[in-house]
Amino acid sequence: MFQKKRFGQHFLTENHIAEEIVSALEPSDDALIIEVGPGKGVLTQFLEKKYKKFKLIELDERLIPFLKNKFPTLQHRIIESDVLKINFDQFPENDIVMIGNFPYNISTQIVFKIIEHKNKISQMVGMFQKEVAERIAAIHGNKSYGVTSVLTQVFFEVEYLFEVAPDAFNPPPKVDSAVIKLSRKPMIKVNESKLKQIVKAAFNQRRKKLSNALKGILPKEVLQEVLFDKRAEALSVEEYVYLANRDYD
């Protein structure tokens, strides 16, 4: 009952895991907590006990009556929408904390949505496919390190909290899962469009030296520098920020 393949739904059934996820949140007193994809409310039950200021975003219209019936006090806190289409500027609060057992088919897109709204979203605790969680948390020199790692870690500290086996879900996914936490770093000045261009070009040809991968993006004379003898995964997040902000005129 309730599962729809197009929503990528795997409902967490273990209360102790749900409580551990909620306990990882560290919101400010003024923060609005937003749960994405509450499903059958396994996280919601602990959020309701702990916090007064939170909303739920649920896309599956069949789950809305279920949630309203299970949590009568949340009647007006449920937003029936796709989180990827939400404009977080609609919320008056300047501090948003996000939590969720995210649908695996859009989890990376959710992370990029958080980055897009980093001025409002200060923190996230979420369940991901283990491979995706490892990618987000990976540091340079690691084979999982890539575009998502760099673009996330420019703006957020990433903590890889714990892993969750398939039997903790209904239906069990065919992959292991992991919970990670994002905490916004102090804002830095970075040329974001240049950063994305450099990072994506570098990792699109990750087996090539940067001097080849970044041809046409950076000046030829700059690419002669020793830094560009390295491959994409060898550069730290800070080095990518340096390349994005550097004056090439």
Image (spheres, rainbow, N blue to C red):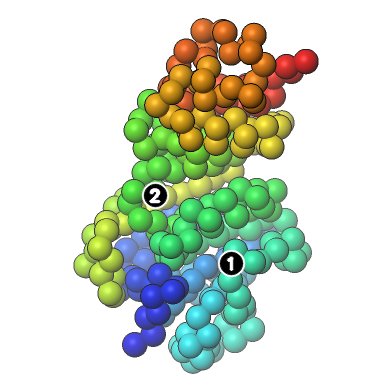
Q: Which mark is first along the chain, 2 or 1?
A: 1
The residue to which callout 1 is attached is 83
Name the amino acid type tagged 1. Val
At 47% from the left and 58% from the top, the residue drawn is: 107
Residue 242, horizontal then vertical, whole percent: 63, 21
Q: In the picture provided, is 56 more to the left or to the right than 2?
A: right
Q: In the picture provided, is 177 more to the left or to the right than 123?
A: left
- Which residue is more in the foreground, 213 or 173? 213
Give the vertical position of 107 relative to 76 (above or below).
Answer: above
Q: In this figure, what is the number of numbered marks? A: 2
At 28% from the left and 66% from the top, the residue drawn is: 173
Q: Quadrant of residue 110?
A: bottom right
- Mark 1 crowd level (few <14, some 14–19, many ≥20, 10 Å Cα): many
Which mark is drawn over residue 132? 2
Q: Are marks 1 and 2 in contact (CB under 8 Å)?
A: no
Residue 8, horizontal then vertical, whole percent: 40, 70
**Looking at the rendering, in which quadrant would you find the N terminus?**
bottom left
Give the vertical position of 139 relative to 126 (above or below).
Answer: above
Asked which secondary structure carries label 2, the reply is: helix
